[in-house]
């Protein structure tokens, strides 16, 4: 099992250490047999402070789709590997919507992460409009096909992110999640994974 904490853009540096200390204390008691849990944050000092804790891995919230070069503000997969991180989120709905990230860019990110031995966590999910039009399964299948085009994988994590439930007052039921889990599994098998 893998417990993920997506840190987002929260508070300041000092607050983060207090929060992580509390998080570690809480999660270590309830999930002793889950294997790994991941703190998603880009700060190398946090990794250095907490890298000695058993069953702890670190991940990043984003990576550049570009290998290297003069791209101010970008973080390359090789930079993440040096920190080191083991996981990286790609395809998150906020990145797709706020930064206009495309499936092709996400595909490039996945390939760069794999080349740097970082496990991609690919977020997929349908909008409310797609859901209401009974196109949710097709939308997610298309995302998987495009994002994983010509990708040879050892490891990847697919995270279902029901975009239609974000800020709408609607909640994904266990039935909703089970249905989409089956769609994702079936599509991954069809893609050869």
Image (cartoon, rainbow, N blue to C red):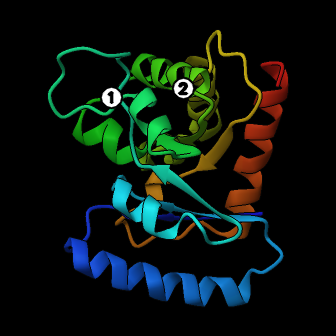
Q: Is residue 97 above or below residue 107?
A: below
Q: Nearer the viewer, residue 8 or 169?
A: 8
Q: Decide if residue 157 is on the left or right side of residue 8.
A: right
Q: Nearer the viewer, residue 61 or 85?
A: 85
Does 11 sit left or right of 135 as displayed? left
Residue that carries the numbered disc 1 in the rendered image: 101
Q: Earlier in the sequence, mark 1 or mark 2?
A: 1
From the viewer's side, name the closer residue of 93 and 111. Answer: 111
Q: Is residue 154 left or right of residue 20?
A: right
Q: Position of residue 117 (x, y in %)?
A: 63, 30
The residue shown at (41%, 48%) is 61
Q: Which residue is at a point 77% across and 57% down the rendered structure image?
A: 178
Which residue is disc 2 drawn over?
Answer: 110
Residue 10 figure quarter: bottom left
| The C terminus - image quarter | top right
The residue at 43%/44% (across/down) is 92
Question: Where's residue 113, x and y in %?
Answer: 54, 28
Which image quadrant for residue 110?
Answer: top right
Can see residue 164? yes
Q: Residue at x 36, y 52 (%)?
A: 42
Label 2: few (<14), some (14–19) or many (≥20) C-alpha neighbours in 10 Å = many
């Amino acid at each position: 099992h893998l417990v993920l904490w997506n840190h987002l853009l929260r508070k300041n540096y000092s607050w983060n250490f207090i929060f992580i200390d509390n998080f570690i204390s809480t999660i270590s008691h309830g999930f002793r047999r889950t294997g790994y849990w991941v703190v998603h944050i880009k700060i190398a000092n946090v990794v250095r402070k907490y890298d000695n804790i058993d069953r702890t891995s670190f991940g990043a919230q984003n990576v550049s789709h570009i290998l290297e070069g003069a791209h101010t503000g970008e973080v390359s997969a090789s930079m993440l590997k040096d920190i080191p991180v083991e996981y990286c989120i790609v395809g998150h709905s906020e990145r797709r919507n706020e930064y206009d990230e495309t499936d092709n860019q996400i595909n490039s990110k996945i390939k760069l992460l794999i080349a740097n031995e970082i496990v991609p966590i690919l977020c997929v999910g349908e909008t409310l409009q797609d859901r209401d039009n009974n196109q949710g399964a097709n939308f997610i299948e298309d995302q998987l096909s495009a994002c994983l085009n010509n990708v040879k994988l050892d490891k990847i994590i697919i995270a279902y992110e029901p975009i239609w439930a974000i800020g709408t007052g609607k909640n994904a039921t266990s039935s909703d999640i089970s249905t989409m889990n089956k769609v994702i599994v079936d599509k991954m098998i069809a893609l050869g994974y």
